[in-house]
Amino acid sequence: MIPNTTLVLEDGNRFDGAAFGAVGERIGEIVFQTGMSGYQETLTDPSYAGQIVVQTAPHIGNTGMNSEDEESLRIWVEGYVVRDPARRASNFRSQRTLDDDLVAGAVVGISGVDTRAITRIIREAGAMRAGIFPLDGRTTEQYLSAVTAAPEMSGRNLSAEVSVAKSYVVPARGQSMGALAVLDLGVKNATLGHLATRGFDVHVLPQSVSLDELLAIEPVGVFYSNGPGDPSASERHVDLLRGVLERGIPFFGICFGNQLLGRALGFETYKLKYGHRGINQPVLDKQTGRIEITAHNHGFAVDAPTDGVIDSPAGFGRVEVSHVGLNDDCVEGLRALDLPAFSVQYHPEATAGPHDSTYLFDQFRDLVLSHHGGA
């Protein structure tokens, strides 16, 4: 391998390798992803907007790419870092190579670098800014200046970048139980499929929607999706959710939606040192005592007591932390006890897996039916 590309981290560490995908220059927050499969779902997950993703699994691209497993209409990662890209794709479902899609999406990547070493740095120092650059004669210090001049993830609102511009409807599969308002903060296709399968006419709404516009569809429930950015920079979405809660409309949120429910209830959020990203995160359901293996992608978390019942600081009654991450005791779910509202920090739609948590979509359906007198 003749190096022609470099990865420079905010702490000064530098890794030279070969271009993978498009050739160019990209700067973002560098994070690691621990999944050994599902790289296509990772790449097309809008939650990764603004981030350079390091795959800890060494071999990436073996099964190629197809049009069925995409979670959105495009690849969202800011940059992509792998150790050993597959020399050829070999799978009966493969339609094109990973490199083809990276080039087509103008996604700049680097290969041939020690991704385990990079991961160890992030685990010790925390998520940080980084840049992928062509080797063009600049010094490490010059590359580093470009990295440190870029904005940090804290304080960034990326919802407008990933949300739909116009609303659309995914019809219910089977008998309809009414309209569900889904605030698209970076929603994944698998999530919409799960909701439509439960009988909702899924109205996907842009993040700029007003409360009056949301109420105009007469929703039987409201759903907040996953998405990128800092929840403290999304106060208009918090205010919108408070309007929903005040009207007693059943609510379910995942990932970013969990953080926004936390803030709507009056809790603070904070940035995790290196975040949770991967498909192997153990979470305890405090009500059942069951441990779920879950898929995660979040760099922020809700700051709330994990034991006992808490009074909502914003005046929405009693609240409890329903799920806890077993690796670091992070808040992984919230349940309002005096309102029909709950959320989880992880991804119950979980493509390409695991599927331990799909029951949460059934719980939401049952909550809506119960609230409207149907069960």
Image (cartoon, helix red, strand yellow):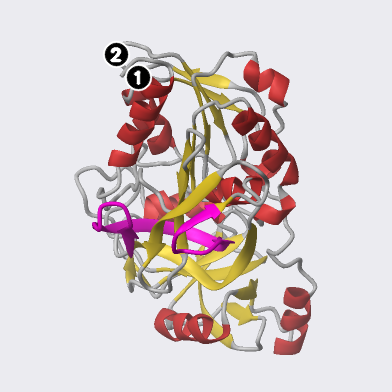
The residue range painted magenta reads 282-310
The question of residue 291 being in magenta is answered with yes
Q: Looking at the magenta stretch, what is its main secondary structure?
A: strand
Q: Amino acid at mark 1?
A: Gly
Look at the image and tell me in which quarter the C terminus lies.
Answer: top left
Q: Amino acid at mark 2?
A: Gly
Residue beneath disc 2: 174
Q: Is residue 329 above or below residue 297?
A: below
| Residue 354 horizontal side relative to residue 13, left or right | left
The residue shown at (64%, 50%) is 263
Q: Is residue 280 above or below residue 123?
A: above
**Front-most of residues 275 and 93:** 275
Task: Classify 10 Å Cα crowding around label 1: few (below 14), some (14-19), many (20 and above).
Answer: some
Kindly state the secondary structure of the residue where label 1 is placed: loop
The residue shown at (62%, 81%) is 9
Kindly state the secondary structure of the residue where label 2 is placed: loop
Which labelled disc corresponds to residue 199? 1
Q: Are marks 2 and 1 in contact (CB under 8 Å)?
A: yes
**Rendering quarter of residue 325:** bottom left
